[in-house]
Image (cartoon, coloured by chain):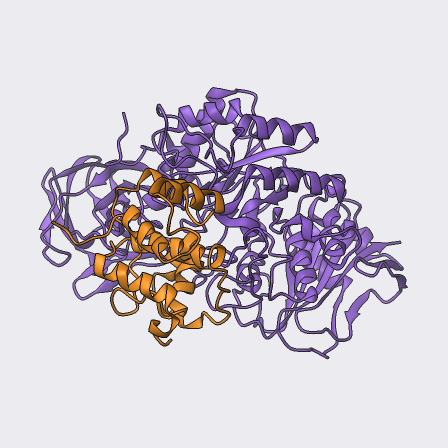
Amino acid sequence: MTDFVKREEFILLLSRNCKELKDLKPDEIFDSGLKALWLESEDLIFRDKFLERRNAARIVHEFLRRVLKEPDEDDISGAKTLKDLYDCHVCTAHIAQVYSKGIMGEKKKNVFGLTDHVYKTEAAKIVDRVYKKENREER
Amino acid sequence: MNNLDRPYTPQNSEYRFDSFSKDSVLLNKKKGHLPAMGWNSWNAFGSGNTEELSKVMADRLIELGLDKLGYQYIVLDDGCYKPVRIDGRVSNEEIKFPSGFRALSDYIHSKGLKFGMYNDVGTNLCAGAEVGTCLHEDVDAQKYVEWGVDFIKVDNCYYPWDNATFSNEANARFVYAPNIKSVRVEGDSFKEEYKAVNGLLYGKGAECKDDHVTGIGTLDGTGPEHSPLGALSSELRFNINVPRSGEYDVYVTYATAEVPGIGCWLQLATGTGDDTVYFYDDPLKATQDSLTFTESEAIKVSFKEGDNLLRLMNHRRQENTLCSYAKLLEAFNKADPDHDVILSICEWGKTQPHIWGRKVGDSWRTLNDITFWVGSDGDPGKAKWQDDYTPSITSQYNKAVIMDEFAGLDKGWNDPDMLTIGMNDLSLDMCKTHMIMWCMMNAPLMLGLDLRRVQKGDELYKIIANKGFIDLNQDALGIQAKRVYCSLAENEPDKEYIRDINRLDILAKPLSDNSAAVSFINVSNEHKSTVTSIDAKTIVKYIGDKMPDKAAFLNAEQYKVIDLWTGNESINSTGKFETASLDPADSVCIKVIPI
């Protein structure tokens, strides 16, 4: 058995602490997320697949700005130490934000690990940091 | 039958590296298009674009009268497809695009505009949807024709035959030659061994390391490190002198890996240009590691009596990518033999597409993205003037400004990416200069802002709707400006790749009415009080051969000078044009008309 988190598990974990979403059923959460654009269709279609770190970054960042209305960090210069930051094109901004906010860190020294899977323990820590700013890492 | 284990095979010599210096195109690609102008969803909305937003942008384009100025394409970028194929076909994401693409295409066409879409030569799109065109070219092209697509931007993520973005890094095996230690030639009482370190390293990128040669392949142009000019790939060459014409056995001592710089794929050929003959173009059997050398099986090679040029190389990075774009073009040709779909090659400069892009495309991106901080509905996103990597206006400009010789009506256009005008963190001077740069460089003009943020006559409107600037970009002569002066250039301002932005540039562009556009650009973030000037003689020295009548320009007694930003007109009798001072990132763009 692996300890990786699946997309759906992560999305539900993320929604559980949000007052607008906590009482919704899983399909309703997906429906709401797709309409509000903090989820993509692939999150629904691949809900049973293991979550990759780049997708975790996207989901978290979009959730922060579209649901929790948390503004982006202006200074994302710290994220430039990640050697794979610009390899991502479409997820570069998401990674830069979750990294700069101290929600997700590097997988190994100076590498974010775009396609590495997210462990369940890691997922819990990410969600905790989404809601509790005091638990975020200093950058 | 192709599969993901093996790249498309070049159909003939026109798909090969040695043909890249020719002007020929493939598959009857139609030429003669001026740079495309329109609106693309990416910088404004990222993956969050919708049918509703796209329609609103089409409406705004018309309301603002931008269509009358030449902006005609509405392009849906990544994020618009259902993430998997349905019955083998691509289709619309149903929440964001509920009415489907044909309905949206009809709406856009009903406005007198043109409809553009996006896909990828890899297996997936950059945002992850598993609907890349690779191995699906025919059915996808058919769909695009059904949807009435006029323009397609084609990305390079998840490309199976290079170590591109989201591809396996081990795909480097396709695009670099193995480490090579020696070559042995045998035949008809002839036997000779040639050490690689004594061979000729031709081009750029390969190097001798201890007892072998490594790094044979094509430089990766995604980042800003390399100049786009000069040699961009490398070969190991030998002169093989044989006593008699005939067939010989060639054995290569090599070691493979699957990392950038060391691969498995070897091309072995004799001769150059039209005389090139390939004797091997395949992977070699993998070795234990990149320093455990082994000898290949015999490769049969025909040599003529006397000197022969033997080339060991791997140009597959360029050839594979060209073949993939060609495959898509071929599919469009099949789906609609009369089509004139604009093909916007977006492989980010990785395989140096300015060398081959004209064969199949209308424009080619020159670097990785101009911004990664794209907007969303209600958020304009951010762009920068300067950055060490590619996400800035000057990073893109620094490279494209010396690439003028690769552009033209019979070729296509260097594409330094979409406009970032209107995004946060850019001053109006930066936006204005951005527009001037792109217009002077004949770059495609793809607006990337939410057009609801623009009102007729406001500051942004004055920039994106400046007819004088746009006319430069769309001038019928179709010549990209040349940099004729650079305060940091040592000898050749038109050829030196300069990334330090603390400088002043002057660009000159010939126009079809025998006038010239001249732009004085403060590339720096600081005020420059230096007087910068250029005279008619210098302008003619650099761009005279492309002017309709250079003598008339040079020998004019007077020049009418129009400032294309202020509209001010003046008469110049000295033939010397100058600007006194420029604010940070500001520029002056004039039209010089001989009278």
Residue at 51% of width from left, 49% of height from top? B46
Q: Quarter holding the C terminus of chain B?
A: bottom right
Residue B441 in percent (x, y) is at 63, 53
Q: Quadrant of residue B290?
A: bottom left
Numbered disc total: 0
Q: Which chain is orange?
A: A
* Left or right: B134 in relation to B499: left
Residue B2 in percent (x, y) is at 28, 29
Residue at 57% of width from left, 51% of height from top? B377
Residue nearer the viewer, B159 or B58: B58
Q: Which chain is purple?
A: B
Q: Is residue B232 visible?
A: no
Q: Residue furthest front?
A: A23
Residue at 72% of width from left, 57% of height from top? B460
Residue B125 in percent (x, y) is at 40, 42
Q: Quarter holding the N terminus of chain B?
A: top left
Q: Is residue B133 visible?
A: yes
* Left or right: B453 in relation to B289: right
Residue at 58% of width from left, 58% of height from top? B401
Residue nearer the viewer, A132 or B148: A132
* Left or right: B509 in relation to B525: right
Q: Quadrant of residue B139?
A: top left
Residue B177 in percent (x, y) is at 24, 49
Residue nearer the viewer, B242 or B248: B248
A50, above or below B486, in the image: above
